[in-house]
């Protein structure tokens, strides 16, 4: 077979199986992208996720050659945004931004019009979440043990705010309550900044959120850090233990960009590579420093395998907590 004929066979096979011989070229032959792309963020405007996504998007635009429009659709533990994205055409022009919880926690807690196991393709991870439980610095709780003791004596009266029902820190707090045989009450909000404001204003007793939301107030002496809700201690509070140390568990929590399952592999790779490169942009690096966030790149295929391997286990945990959908 001649080289020309050999290449022709390969080209036809690639076209038949949807293989991208030409990076960023869709099945129809169109070079992607030819128009603006929309990223749907499942958190409210102005928070850490919103800001980090917008900075990453602006950096990725340089390589993609098209603007990325960021829209906010908060609520429902991320289910509102995810439902919107997964109903969209899988052409790479609509993608979503969400935390791991919307894949492995929320579907076990409430009815959602999608199946995370079959209806989406991950593009890439760009951040890892860390969370802390904090109270006002003038509160009577100096340690996490003080909170547990109070909750034991006053069932349901201790309140804490989070950025929505079913977020990782919500499940972590309820797992602790089950272990300690106490009861406290979670108050959901639509963004990470809102529960901090509520805590500072005395509307909730505590806030369970990430570094961008709580560190400025810890450093200003307005919030007291009581417990890291992840597997590591925070550098700013090396003497404060983690939930992994105290209770032997922690929640997987990353921020990723995903698309409807119909997106072609060529388009998925084009987006993944552009966003990965954007993480090296000085503006993204500076934003990460200013928000005290942990940036990490994980490819879409690898990340899908990671969270899917925890899906069934998390369902059992949520059922054991009495939080499973009826």
Image (cartoon, rainbow, N blue to C red):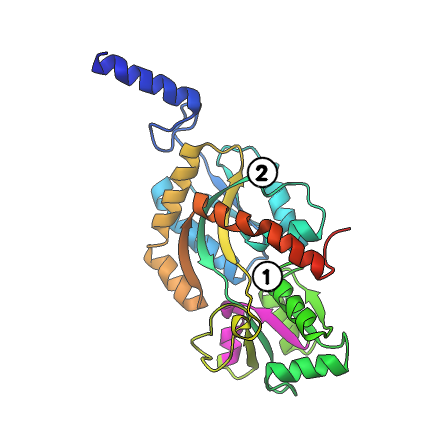
Residue 209 magenta-highlighted: yes
Q: Which mark is residue 168?
A: 1
Q: Position of residue 232 (x, y in %)?
A: 47, 70
Q: In this rendering, would 325 be left or right of 25?
A: right
Q: Which residues are magenta?
A: 205-218
Q: Secondary structure at mark 1?
A: helix
Q: Which comes before the other along the chain, label 2 or label 1? A: 2
- Pick the residue in front: 125 or 282: 125
Foreground of the two, 130 or 204: 130
Extreme residue toward the left, this view: 2
- The Cα–Cα distance between marks 2 and 1, rounded to whole angstroms, is 22 Å
Tags 2 and 1 in contact by the CB under 8 Å rule? no
Marker disc for residue 118:
2
Please provide percent x and percent y for residue 92: 48, 36
Residue 86 placement: quadrant: top right
Q: Front-most of 95 and 254? A: 254
At x 48%, y 80%, the residue is 219
Q: Position of residue 121 (x, y in %)?
A: 51, 40
Task: Establish if 236 lies above or below 85.
Answer: below
The quarter of the image holding the N terminus is: top left
Does dot 2 land on a helix, a strand or a loop? loop
Q: Where 164 sits versus 326, above or below?
A: below
Q: Is residue 225 visible?
A: yes
Q: Return the x and y of residue 210 as percentages of the image width and height.
A: 53, 67
Q: Is residue 212 magenta?
A: yes
């Amino acid at each position: 077979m001649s080289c020309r004929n050999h290449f022709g066979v390969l080209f036809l096979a690639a076209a038949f199986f949807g293989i991208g011989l030409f990076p960023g070229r869709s099945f129809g032959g169109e070079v992607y992208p030819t128009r603006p792309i929309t990223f749907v963020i499942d958190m409210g405007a102005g928070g850490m996720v919103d800001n980090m996504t917008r900075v990453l998007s602006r950096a990725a635009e340089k390589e993609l050659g098209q603007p990325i429009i960021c829209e906010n659709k908060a609520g429902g533990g991320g289910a509102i945004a995810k439902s919107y994205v997964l109903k969209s055409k899988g052409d790479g022009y609509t993608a979503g931004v969400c935390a791991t919880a919307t894949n492995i926690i929320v579907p076990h807690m409430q009815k959602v019009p999608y199946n995370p196991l079959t209806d989406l393709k991950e593009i890439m991870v760009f951040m890892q979440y860390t969370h802390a439980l904090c109270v006002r610095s003038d509160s009577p709780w100096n340690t996490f043990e003080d909170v547990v003791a109070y909750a034991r004596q006053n069932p349901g009266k201790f309140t804490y705010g989070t950025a929505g029902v079913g977020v990782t820190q919500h499940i972590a707090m309820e797992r602790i309550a089950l272990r300690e045989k106490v009861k406290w009450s979670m108050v959901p909000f639509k963004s990470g900044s809102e529960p901090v404001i509520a805590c500072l204003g005395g509307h909730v007793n505590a806030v369970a959120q990430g570094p961008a939301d709580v560190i400025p107030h810890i450093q200003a002496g307005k919030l007291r850090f009581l417990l890291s809700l992840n597997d590591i201690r925070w550098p700013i509070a090396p003497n404060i233990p983690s939930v992994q140390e105290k209770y032997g568990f922690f929640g997987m929590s990353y921020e990723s960009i995903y698309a409807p399952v119909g997106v072609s592999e060529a388009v998925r790779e084009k987006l993944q590579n552009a966003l990965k490169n954007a993480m090296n942009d000085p503006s993204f690096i500076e934003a990460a420093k200013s928000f005290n966030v942990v940036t990490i790149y994980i490819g879409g295929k690898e990340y899908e395998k990671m969270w899917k391997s925890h899906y069934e286990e998390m369902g059992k945990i949520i059922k054991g907590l009495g939080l499973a959908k009826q």
